[in-house]
Image: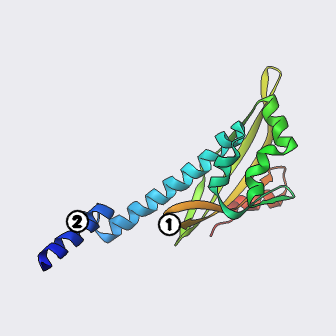
């Protein structure tokens, strides 16, 4: 009877953590860090297409329920973050044709939290050309709960020569 419990326990560990019996703890920790980085990169990459398509539900799922997004002097909170696609300025971008490009982020991880910094460019269609109408520095503060990363706060500042925007690119955990 004891043998079956031990075997069942080992099978359970192998099922829930398939690498647990194959790798050292340090390798498993390194793999977890890699997975966390990839999840954060994927989360940030989802933002642009969701913004361009006006998909508030996808944007809402990226943020914590009480998460915030500050751009320029505006701060959106909770459901207001997802509703940004309904702002007049955003609707005008979409009507003209727009593309939100986000650069690969630099990510600093700590236990259950992360800070990512990157650049974003919003291109808008003007006659026969695409024009960069916003070029910003971004700081994403993220938290991990139950294996999923969510944005707790994002700050975006126009790169217009102001020190405030440049400082976003230097700040880490």
**In the rendered image, the vertical position of residue 91 relative to residue 163, given as above or below:** above
Q: Quadrant of the C terminus?
A: bottom right
Whether residue 23 is visible here, answered yes or no, is no
Q: Position of residue 43 (x, y in %)?
A: 58, 51
* Kind of element beneath mark 2: helix
Q: Residue at x 12, y 76 (%)?
A: 3
Q: Label 1, on which residue?
A: 146
Residue 16 position by quadrant:
bottom left
Q: Position of residue 123 (x, y in %)?
A: 76, 35
Q: Position of residue 57 (x, y in %)?
A: 66, 48
Q: Is residue 113 left or right of residue 157?
A: left
Q: Badge 2, how many Cα within 10 Å: few under 14, some, many 20+?
A: few
Q: Badge 1, how many Cα within 10 Å: few under 14, some, many 20+?
A: few
Furthest toward the bottom, the residue is: 2
Q: Residue at x 78, y 24 (%)?
A: 129
Furthest toward the top, the residue is: 128
Q: Front-most of 49 and 30?
A: 49
* Kind of element beneath mark 1: loop
Q: Could you say which disc has been placed on residue 24 in the image?
A: none
Residue 116 position by quadrant:
bottom right
Q: Is residue 162 left or right of residue 45?
A: right
Whether residue 13 is visible here, answered yes or no, is yes
Q: Earlier in the sequence, mark 2 or mark 1?
A: 2
Q: Residue at x 73, y 42 (%)?
A: 121
Q: Front-most of 168 and 13?
A: 13
Q: Could you say which disc has been placed on residue 11 in the image?
A: 2
């Amino acid at each position: 009877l004891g043998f079956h419990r031990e075997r069942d326990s080992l099978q359970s560990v192998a099922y829930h953590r398939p690498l647990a019996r194959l790798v050292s703890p340090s390798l498993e920790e390194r793999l977890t860090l890699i997975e966390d980085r990839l999840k954060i990169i994927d989360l940030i990459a989802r933002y642009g297409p969701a913004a361009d398509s006006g998909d508030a539900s996808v944007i809402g799922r990226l943020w914590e329920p009480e998460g915030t997004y500050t751009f320029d002097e505006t701060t959106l909170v909770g459901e207001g973050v997802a509703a940004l696609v309904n702002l007049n300025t955003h609707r005008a971008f979409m009507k003209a044709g727009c593309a939100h490009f986000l650069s690969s982020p630099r990510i600093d991880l700590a236990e259950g939290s992360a800070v990512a910094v990157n650049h974003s460019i919003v291109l808008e269609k003007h006659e026969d050309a695409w024009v960069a109408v916003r070029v910003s520095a971004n700081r994403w503060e993220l938290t991990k709960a139950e294996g999923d990363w969510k944005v707790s706060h994002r700050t975006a500042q126009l790169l217009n020569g102001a020190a405030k925007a440049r400082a976003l690119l230097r700040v880490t955990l």
